[in-house]
Amino acid sequence: MVERGESASRRAEWLTGPSVPEDYWPGRRLGFPQSGTGSAASLLRRAAGIVVDWGLVVLAVRLTMDADPIPQNIAIQSGFALLYLVCVWLLGRTPGHLLMGIGVVDLATRRTLASTGPVGLLRAFVRTLLVCLVVPVVIMDPDGRGLHDRASGAAVVRTR
């Protein structure tokens, strides 16, 4: 028979979920340093980068289109997808990433703009498609990679 105190501790253990070792940091399994350049980008930097990119697209659409909201909304989503695709493909980062000091690294080749070059078109396309769906971005693993990162074989790291 389980005693009252033991039952409560088991419940608390179940509610906290699985634990990670004390010497673990996001990106360790991927070979990233614990901090500084090349470490896994924080959720805050990533979110701020998306907000900057979205804001740039909204500003551009509002300045160039009529006030009808339906075409504007379509143009904003399309513009964001185009900005994200082209920038990640050719530069390995978006303007928001650049401002936040982060960039996308292809895990197969470890290529970034800071090291050897941009991320490939296929990886950029997969990432863009999943970022526009939103949900894959918010489901993250212990290394701080969203489903869009895992599906595209990429990760977001600090560049400064």
Image (spheres, rainbow, N blue to C red):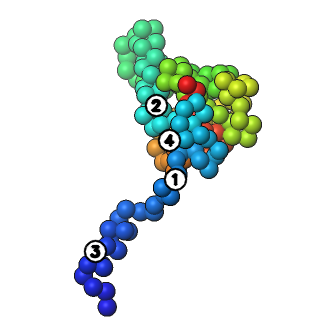
- Contact? badges 1 and 4 (CB < 8 Å): no
- Report the disc number at residue 137: 4
- Report the disc number at residue 45: 2
The quadrant where residue 6 appears? bottom left
Bin the neighbour count of mark 1 within 10 Å (Cα to Cα): few under 14, some 14-19, many 20 and up: few
16 lies left or right of 87: left
The residue sitting at 53% across, 37% down in the picture is 35
Q: Is residue 60 visible?
A: yes
Query: Measured along the vertical axis of the image, is residue 35 above or below residue 68?
Result: below
**SS class, disc 1:** loop
Bin the neighbour count of mark 3 within 10 Å (Cα to Cα): few under 14, some 14-19, many 20 and up: few
Give the alpha-carbon distance from disc 4 to disc 3, as whole Å: 35 Å
Q: Give the x, y percent position of residue 121.
A: 71, 30
Amino acid type, callout 3: Ala
Q: Give the x, y percent position of residue 156.
A: 57, 35
Image quarter of the N terminus: bottom left
Amino acid type, callout 2: Arg
